[in-house]
Every structure is written in structure tokens, then in C-alpha cells.
Image (cartoon, rainbow, N blue to C red):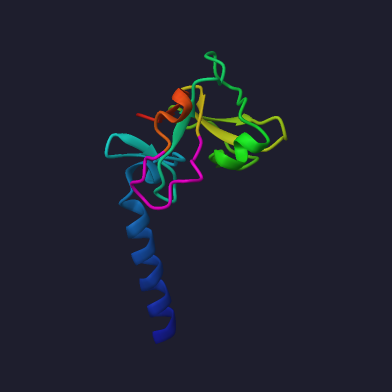
Amino acid sequence: MRKWCIIAATWVAIAGFLGTTPARAAGEPAQAEDGVLVGPNGMTLYTFDKDPADGGKSVCNGPCATNWPPLAAAAEAKPVGDFAPITRDDGAMQWAYKGKPLYYWVKDQKRGDRTGDGFRDVWRLARP
């Protein structure tokens, strides 16, 4: 009996912790933190100026996607708020915010890093 109480208390604590993250609690794939969007891992997200303005398409593939990993969406992901899943050229799913695909930057090493902003004058911080 005591074992089950400990397990239940642990799950309640985990659920409470996850519930303190506003965007995650709302089911959104990213959240605002210090004026920018961050992924579930807390790392900064970016947008790519070369992605089509009408949204719904990523042109960052191959080596580009190695350096700028997409914010992956599950195959069964559905739109939520300003976020929508898009299909990449390789068939994988990626999250977009207000039509702009979202990416991480491989050179950001820790939470709060924003080293990709302005890279080659085409990469921008994703802002809510």
C-alpha cells in the first residue's frame, strides 16, 4: 500500500510540475520565455526568412536541417492555437507558428542561448 502511495504522490508532483508551463499545459508545442519561443526542451526556436511567406512549407532540408533541426511534430499532430503541423520534404512533420516553420540551432548549447539570431541575415528568433 505504501509503495502505491509513493507512486501516486510522484505522479501528482510530476503533473503539477508540467502544469506550471503555460504553453505545455495548453497543449502547444512551444512556449514564450523571455520574449522568444522555446521548445519543450527549453531551447530557443528560430524562423528562416527563405521559407515561403504564405507558410506551410520548409525549404530548410538536407545539410540545412542538420544545422537547423526542425521542431518535430508527431505524425498525428493537430493544429493548436497559432501552431500547426506541416509536412517536410522527407515526410516528417514539423511545427509552424503562424505559418512559419520552427527550428533549433545546433550551436545553441544551453537554455537561453540565442546564437543563431541574425545568422547569415536570414535566421531570426521566433517571437510570440
- Residue 9: give x, y in percent of width and height: 36, 72
The reply to whether the magenta stretch includes residue 104 is yes
Task: Say which of 66 and 100 sits in front.
Answer: 66
Residue drawn at 56 percent across, 16 percent down: 52
- Residue 101: give x, y in percent of width and height: 53, 29
Q: Identify the image quadrant of residue 8.
A: bottom left
Task: Say which of 36 and 110 sits in front.
Answer: 110
Looking at the image, residue 120 lies above or below residue 54: below
- Residue 46: give x, y in percent of width and height: 45, 33
Residue drawn at 43 percent across, 52 percent down: 109
Q: Is residue 98 visible?
A: yes
Task: Say which of 81 and 65 sits in front.
Answer: 65
- Residue 71: give x, y in percent of width and height: 53, 40
Q: Is the stretch drawn in magenta largely helix, strand or loop?
A: loop
Give the magenta range: 103-115
Q: Which image quarter is the C terminus in? A: top left
Residue extending furthest toward the left = 34
Compared across the picture, whether 118 is left or right of 71 comes to: left
Residue extending furthest toward the front = 120
Q: Is residue 1 visible?
A: no
